[in-house]
Image: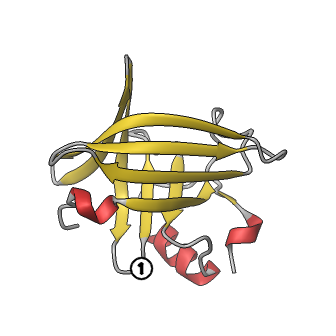
Amino acid sequence: MESIVNSQLTGKWYQLARTFNFYEKRFVEIMYYISISCESDMDLLYIGVKEDRSKILKKFSLKILTKNDSDYLVLRKGLFRKTLKILTFDNKNGILILSDRKMKNISILSRKTYINHNVLESYLSKIEFFNNEVKLYSNNIV
C-alpha cells in the first residue's frame, strides 16, 4: 500500500460497517469529518447519532504514522490515545478500512453513504487474519 498523505483523508467519512464495539453499540449512524489543522496535524470530528437522532460530538487530534511498512491513524484527546491500523485505503473509490492492533475490531468507512455488497465482500476477503462477524448497517449496503 502506498503512503497516505493528510489531504487524501480530509472530508466526510461514513461508517458503513463494523464489528461489535462496546463504545459505539448505542449509535445507529457514525460519521467522521477530517480537516487539516496545520501541515502535519489533522483534526477529527466524531459524530455518533442515536436512534432518537440526538448526536454526540467529540473532537480528536489525528496523525498518520508509518511503521514497518504499515500506516496507522493515531487519535489523541488529552490522555486518551488510540492507534488504528489502516488495512485498506482506496482513494479512487473512497474506501477506508481500519482495525485495532489485535484485529478484533474493524470499521469500514466510505466517502459515500452506501456501498455495493459485492465490493464490500471483495475488500473483506483481502484482509488477512480476520474472521469476526461484521455488523452491516442495512441502509448502507446496496
Tell me if I can see residue 132 in this picture: no
68 vs 125: above or below:
above
Residue that lies at the very extreme toward the front in this rendered image? 37
53 vs 12: above or below:
above
The picture places residue 117, in percent across and down from the top left corner, at: 63, 79
In the image, 28: left or right of 82? right
Question: Which residue is the site of mark 1?
Answer: 93
The N terminus - image quarter = bottom left
Question: Image point 22% across, 42% down: which residue?
Answer: 41
The picture places residue 69, in percent across and down from the top left corner, at: 16, 54
Question: Image point 84% across, 45% down: which residue?
Answer: 52
Question: Image point 34% across, 54% down: which residue?
Answer: 86
Tell me if I can see residue 99 in this picture: yes
100 vs 142: above or below:
above
The C terminus - image quarter = bottom right
The residue nearer to you, when weighing 8 against 19, is 8
In the image, 11: left or right of 54? left
